[in-house]
Amino acid sequence: MPSFSRRGGKAVAGLTLFDKLWASHLVRDLDETTGLIAIDRILLHERTGGIALKSLAEAGHAVRDPSRVFVTMDHVVDTLPGRGDDTIMPTGKQFIVETRAAAHAAGVTLFDLGDPRQGIVHVISPEQAIVLPGLTLVCPDSHTCTQGALGALAWGIGSSEAEHALATNTLRVSRPANMRIVIDGALGDGVSAKDLALHIVATIGSAGARGYMLEYAGEAVRDLDVEARMTLCNMATELGAFSAIIAPDDKVYAYLQGRSYAPEGARWVDAMESWQHLHSDPDAHFARELRLDASAVAPMVSWGTSPSQSLAVGRAVPVTGDDSDARARDYMDIGSGAEIAGLPIDAAFIGSCTNARLSDLRIAAAVLSGRQVAPGVRAICVPGSGEVKRAAEAEGIDTILIGAGFEWREPGCSMCFFAGGESFGAGQRVISSTNRNFENRQGQRTRTHIASPATVAASAVLGRIALPRDLPPLRAEALA
């Protein structure tokens, strides 16, 4: 028997988690499909945030509530040791200097270069507990959906929308429909959240969730740790989704408690009580729902120039007559029917808002311990934040990676894309833990294969696309 709540004297069916967050932040309906939504947190970075702050000031408006605004330097900064304001990117220094000045003038919180909290915006927000269950959070960055993993309504916006949010703490939002992906069962050994994310986008396509607010649910999702959930939600934008969300649970609460911006004392108790309703009701309606079997997911790698062009490692590139597939095969220099496993690589990259957290670096270090990167392969690791970097160094992860032949960098987006001015070479084949493999994403004519940190690490050692299971056993002296 469905349960019902009362609204305006009318009985309505149960609500989705998104429905509840929309209702609790709705200032007023603007029309049948659009609402004015209250915004709790605003995140900015120097590539777009400085523009928003500067334009707002030039228009004569102030930031309405500076305590709700957080700015970091991440996109155009160098990640080389000893970095400063100067960057490889032409005009990069101007982005940094102007964002710093605008942030100070507005009185907002700035995680500047040299600040131990600095890092990639979608890494530092959860680790500082800026994002919390039940909040609305926006950022002029398409991967803001990452933070829905903690039960927040978080989505990417444009710079002009950021100005409006800064001035009013509200935004006009076209309401998306509800969609749920339920993932039953358990992931197999060696299969990660990144593999699951690539499996989903390969299954339903890059427009498979367009127009929808996506909720992930099911046994396999509940089994993921919080950082793995962030990886899964991060790639919802590659499905075309408005955003993604996962109902918070005890794992999320344990992750957040004690962090810098988390509630304390009685406020924590009150917050915990309020978070208990943050789940979809059993009879909630979803306009679209899919069920997937986690045991069917294998380690994945992209073969083309869209995340949707991905397949299980060991499978052959599909034979299709699709023009976009043909263009991708040409750009990637891969024939239809070719095997991806075994393709020689020139470089390996571990980093980005998708896979640069401590858990990701631990996985890579476990693969690389006692091993060496193949001759001729350039290997780079960029921690997602200063806190991640320090924690990894305290565990000796940096020693393992450097010993294996990886460069160990300062926090930032780095070569997720080459807005920082640094890139891989033309025609080079790169295996990367990032989220996008578009043409020229990591450099002019660079060919990018996206995969999990474990697959990236194993491929770096063997000099070809491979899995950890393909690595030869370590010799006794390497284990000593």
Image (tube, grey):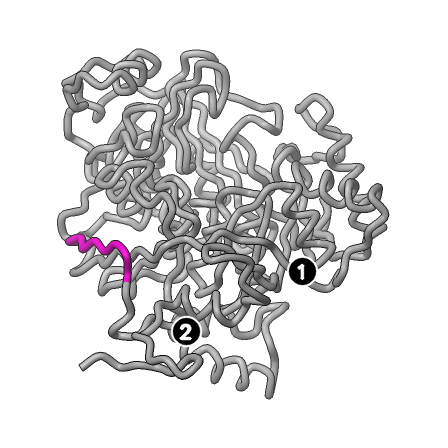
Residue depicted at 51% across the width and 57% down the height: 31
Q: Secondary structure at mark 2?
A: loop
What is the quadrant of residue 244 in the picture? bottom left
At which x and y percent is residue 183?
A: 22, 57
Q: Name the residue type under label 1.
A: Asn
Compared with 31, 211 (above or below) is above
Write down the residue under mark 2: 278
Question: In the picture provided, is 184 more to the left or to the right than 263?
Answer: left
Q: Secondary structure at mark 1?
A: loop
Residue 291 falls within the magenta-colored stretch: yes
- Regarding residue 438, the answer to whether it shows in the image is yes
At which x and y percent is residue 470?
A: 20, 34
- Regarding residue 477, the answer to whether it shows in the image is no
Residue depicted at 76% across the width and 45% down the height: 53
Dot 2 or dot 1, earlier in sequence: 1
The one nearer the camera, 360 or 1, is 1
Which region is colored magenta? Answer: 286-293
At which x and y percent is residue 50?
A: 73, 41
The one nearer the camera, 267 or 37, is 37
Write down the residue under mark 1: 169
What is the quadrant of residue 471 in the picture? top left
Compared with 17, 454 (above or below) is above
